[in-house]
Every structure is written in C-alpha cells, then in structure tokens.
Image (cartoon, rainbow, N blue to C red):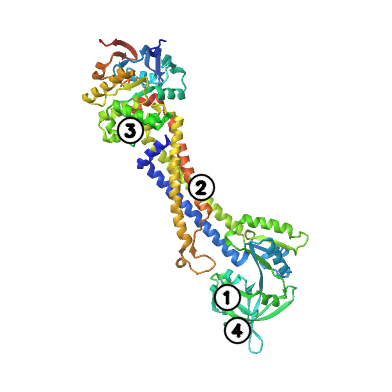
Amino acid sequence: MKESELITIDHLTKVYPTGTGGFKALKDINLTFQSGEFSGVVGPSGSGKTTLLNIIGTLDNPTEGKASVLGRSVNDLSSKEAARLRNHHIGFIFQTYNLLSVYTVYENVEFPLLLLDYSSDKREKMVMDALNWVNLADKKNFRPSQLSGGESQRVAIARAIVKKPELILADEPTANLDAKNSYLILEIMEKMNQELGTTFIFATHDDKVMKSLKRTISLEDGRVAGDDLAKA
Amino acid sequence: MIRFLIKGLLRDRSRSLFPLITVTIGVALVTLGDSWVDGALVDIIDNNARLETGHVKVVTRAYKEQISSAPNDLALLGTKDLINDLEKEFTNMEWTPRIRFGGLLDVAGEEGVTIRQVRGSGLAVDLSEGSKEIERLDLNKILVQGHLPQTSDEILLSPGLMENLQVEVGDEVTLISSSMYGSMVIHNFTISGKIRFGIVALDRNMMIAPLEGIRYALNMEDAAGEILGYFKDPGEYDKNLTASMKEYFNKTYHNPKDEFSPYLLTLRDQNFLNDILLLYENAMGIFIFIFVLIMFIILWNAGLMNGIRRYGEMGLRLAIGESAHHIYLTSIAEAVFIGLGGSVIGTLIGLGFAGYLQNYGVDVTGMLESNSLYMSNVIRARISGSTFYIGFIPGVLATALGAIVSGRGIYKRKTAQLFKELEV
Ligand SMILES: Nc1ncnc2c1ncn2[C@@H]1O[C@H](COP(=O)(O)OP(=O)(O)OP(=O)(O)O)[C@@H](O)[C@H]1O
Ligand SMILES: [Mg+2]
C-alpha cells in the first residue's frame, strides 16, 4: 500500500441476506482512494452507493474480498475498534441533518468531542474553528429549529469536521437543499478539501455535486461501470 | 458527557418530566406510607405498653405460663429488692409493680345482706407520690366523675360496674377475692371516681385500685403479679434492645429449676403483639414492593418511548463512534439522575405530609363509632430515620431498572442500517 492510499477495496462483494438466498448489492469492486480526493459514487437508485459508503465507513462488513480504510482492514475490526476508528478519523454527513434539537448549534458541534478527553478550552477552540469554516460562528447559540435547511446542513458539516478527520463520507448531502444552498455547502467542502486536505467521498444523484467532483465512480447494479477523473 | 446529556435532559422537559413526576409521586407515597405505618406501629406499641405489657415485663415463670389468667398465687415476692436490682441493671428504664386481680364486687343493703353482686376485673397500680402511673394510664383524662384514690381504701370503677351495682361515687363496695395463699378475702372500698376508657371490654367491668390497698387486701405484702419496665425515654424503645435485655436478664436472674424465679418478657412476647407488628412491617414491605413494580413498569415504558423519540440521536451517536455499551450506560446514568431528582422531591413532599400528620394528626373521631382513648382516633405519622431514605431505594431502583430493561434496544441497532435510518 502506498503512503497516499487512504482506502483500498479489493474484490469486494456484499451480499445482503434475504429469504431467497441473499441479494448481491456489490459485486467484485476494486477501487483505491488517495488521500485528499474529492470523489463521488454515482448511479441509479439501488445501485449500491450507500452500501459502499457503509463499508468504507466501517458501519458494515464486506461479505467477500477486502476493504482497508486508513490502514485498518475493515474485515477484522471488532465493533469497538470500528467505533474508535469512526470516532477519531471519519466524519459523516447525512441527507437529513440529524441535529439534536435540544442542543444549541455550538453544542451539536461539540458533541463528537465529548467522547475524547479534550480540555474544555481545546474543545472551544475546535468548535469555533469548525463553525468559522461553515460561517456560522454568529449563530452558535441558536437551536436547530431556528435554522434554515442550508444552515442546518452547514452545522452538520461543522460537526463532521470538528475533529479534523482524514475522511468525510457524505450520503446525498444536498438532497434536501435548494441550488443556492447546495452550491454554498459544496464550496465549503471544496475549500476544506483544498486547504485541509480532507478526503471527501460522496454518494449522490445530484448534478450540482457531480459537476464539482474531481473523480466520479459510476455504479450500476452493484458493479463499477466507470471511473473518470474530471478534466482539469 | 454525562453533564452534557443531563443538560439535554433538563431542556427537553417532555423527556424528563413524566419520569420525574412518576418517581416523585411514587416516592412521596412510599415515604408517607412508611411514616404512617411507623406512626401506627408506635401507637400500637405505646398503647399496649402503657395499658398492659410495659416495654418489658418481669413475672415468675409459673405466672408466665398462665399469664392470661393473672394467677396471683404465682406472683413475684420481694419486689422491692427486685426493682432495686432492675434499676441498677438497666439505668435507662423505670420499673413499676402492678397486680391484676379479679373478684366479686358486693353491695350490701341496710342489714348487711348482699343485694347485688357483680364480677369485675381489676388493676392495682402504684398511685403513691413520684409514681408515673397516673400519667401513664392517663387517669386524669379517663376519670369522668369523682377523684383519684387518695387513700388505699378508695377505688375507681368503670361505668358498667357502677350501673350493674347501682352505685354512685362515694358509695361503699366490698371486694370478695382470694389471697395470694388461696384463702378467701373480703375488703371494703369506697368508690372515689368513675373511669371511662372508651374500650367496650374495659368499660364493662374494669376497676382500678391503689397498689397498697390491694396488697393489703390480698395479703400480698411486697409482692406483685407483674413488674413493668418502661424506657425513661419512650422513643428509645427498640425490639432488638428489649430482646437483648431479655436474654441478659433471663441468663443472669432466672433459675430454670425454680419456677418462681423472675423471668423477663418483652412487649412482643405478649398479646400476640409480635404477630400483629410483623403483619404491619410486612405490609410495608409489600406496599413498597408493589410501588417499585408499578413505577418500574411505567418507567420501563417511558424508557421505551424515549428510545423511539431519541432514535435519531442514538443512531447518530453510534455513527460518530460512540459504542453501544457507552450509550447504554449513559442512558442508565440519565435515568438514575432522574430517579435521584424524583426521590429527593418525592421524599420532601412525603416528609411534608408526614410532618403535618406527625404534628397535627388527622382527627377521625367523627368517623369512628366509639370514642376510645386507647385506640387512636387521630391518624398520626412518625418521621423516623427510615423516612428519609426509604423512598430513595424504590425511586432509584425503579428508574434504573426501567432504563436497564428498556435501554437494551441499543444493542439491536445495526450500524449497517444507520445511513438508511438517519435518512428518514
Ligand atoms: N439490509 C438490506 N437487506 C437486503 N437488501 C438490501 C439491504 N440494504 C440494501 N439492500 C439492497 O441493496 C441494493 C443497494 O442498496 P443501496 O442502499 O446501497 O442503494 P443506493 O445506491 O444507495 O440507492 P439510493 O440512491 O436509492 O440511496 C438495493 O437493491 C437494496 O434493495
Ligand atoms: Mg443510498
């Protein structure tokens, strides 16, 4: 494995157990992702995008083949080790923002840090840094119910990046946003990718997202049907 | 983390208020119930002790065997010395001799011929100066006519006896009974007053006479059927304390070969009081158990509801790398926090009501048919040490159990589903 290879996927197959012998959601996938990529998995509904992100995010295990993330083999991780890996190195952004309504913007972003033994000074610095990235420092005391959809997703992004993870997985992050807000959050994520070197992997249908991707992996029926680098 | 979660708990009142109210009510009821039962127990103990059993009682073993018929031929002798010994052994107690006696009361006509005769049962008590019997039996209160005996030849009769004998205060009656040695004795008393206990059985045929008069009449110089012992501070009464007194006294003073040697009985050894008091104590245990059960079921369901309401939060926490075990433990910690809060509030409320009952009582005289002095017609509570913590055990236990059972769902969450679950 080369130094810059963040993720390697080797002959990966995922079979979901069903009543009739199982459903093959991913078939013989071979992919590598370099550190610092800004890539996306695209494809029709049911093609296996989320399944692939799940495995990369150590939320699920491969049925066959190997996947290794940040130098750790996903196949061999115990659930506790997988949780640790997620906690330290991977950020998630969801289609719905999943903010906790009883907490303020600031507290929602602080939440992932509470599992780590950081001093409150250090936490405050990290939270404010993340909020500055998404341009919401002035709304830190707002509750999620007082935010627009775009602002909510920006808080979710701040929550995903607050620990400065190497890898951020975003499943349909723009699905609930209008064009203006979609471009705004894409801009933020591109900037993070450039300035912090954070690796982004999207799963998306959204043209706006696809246009900004530097690499597009097409899935069709559980297989890789294309893997294109964007023209510079 | 816990601080953070508790902050959320306090802000989300729909999450915390219902369990809190459940625990508060349950704990308040348990606290009040406990102090009420305690109050009832204290009443039973106190009334029995004063009227009949003492906190402890010394008799001969032979007397003990037939204690219900109060056989004075088996009475204790040398009571002065015995009481001296008892006072030296147990400096926290005070001792008083009593004689229970029975006999015929006889009223004679002009020519000295009997015109009426009624069977009565009597209690001879020390009415001399310095004795606390007047206070203990509340004689001033139950005296409804006349005065307390001032000489050893005066006697107090219950309304039933006076009616059946057709006598008035100031009249003379003759007691026909048997002496300690079995011979028939006849002694004249003047009725100095009428006493009403408010207890039917006692008001029918009870009489109270001065100890000296009965000792003289029954030939019981320095003898007594029973010596009753009372804690100088009645609050000191404790079943374990009296049990150890019994063990010590009977080992030291009782001679198993001599059936006339003194033997110490505790309050609980008499009048089936042990059974009655155990019944109360067990009732309290069952009461608490039922409350824990009800609270547990309510809180378990509240926990399940919470699990549904906070499904997204739990999923998110799993996704960002919190282990299921950690989430489970923190949800129990949250519940215990609520349990503690509810227990504190519930205990305070319970104590408030109990304090009111303790100080003022609820007078139920109107609801009772007969107004009896010895059966409490005032419901009282008693705040004891246990009142302060008895609610905590069920309060915290029920919330913790509720969370332990309802929170297990977190282990059933599959991380592989989280993306999908969180998209909804
Ligand atoms: N737990 C499961 N059990 C059985 N089949 C599943 C399960 N999860 C997903 N699948 C199937 O696997 C296939 C791929 O699902 P996946 O969620 O990865 O699709 P997707 O590309 O993310 O689709 P979408 O764009 O609609 O989100 C689908 O056909 C789906 O029915
Ligand atoms: Mg999907």
Residue sitting at the far left = A180
Specify whether B110 is left or right of B327: right
Give the foreground label among 3 and 1: 3
Q: Dot 4 corresponds to which residue?
A: B171
Chain name for mark 2: B
The picture quadrant for ligand 1 comes to top left
For label 1, the crowd category at 10 Å Cα-Cα, with few meaning under 14, some 14 to 19 and many 20 or more, is many
Residue B335, by quadrant, is top left
Chain name for mark 1: B
Residue type at mark 2 is Phe
Q: Dot 1 corresponds to which residue?
A: B158
Chain name for mark 3: A
Give the foreground label among 3 and 2: 3
Residue type at mark 4 is Asp
Chain name for mark 4: B
In the figure, A162 relative to B267: above or below? above
Residue B289 numbered tag: 2
Residue B51, given in percent of the width and then of the height, sits at 60, 67
Is residue B44 visible in this depiction of the protein?
yes
Residue type at mark 1 is Ser
Identify which residue, B369 or A3, lies in the foreground: A3
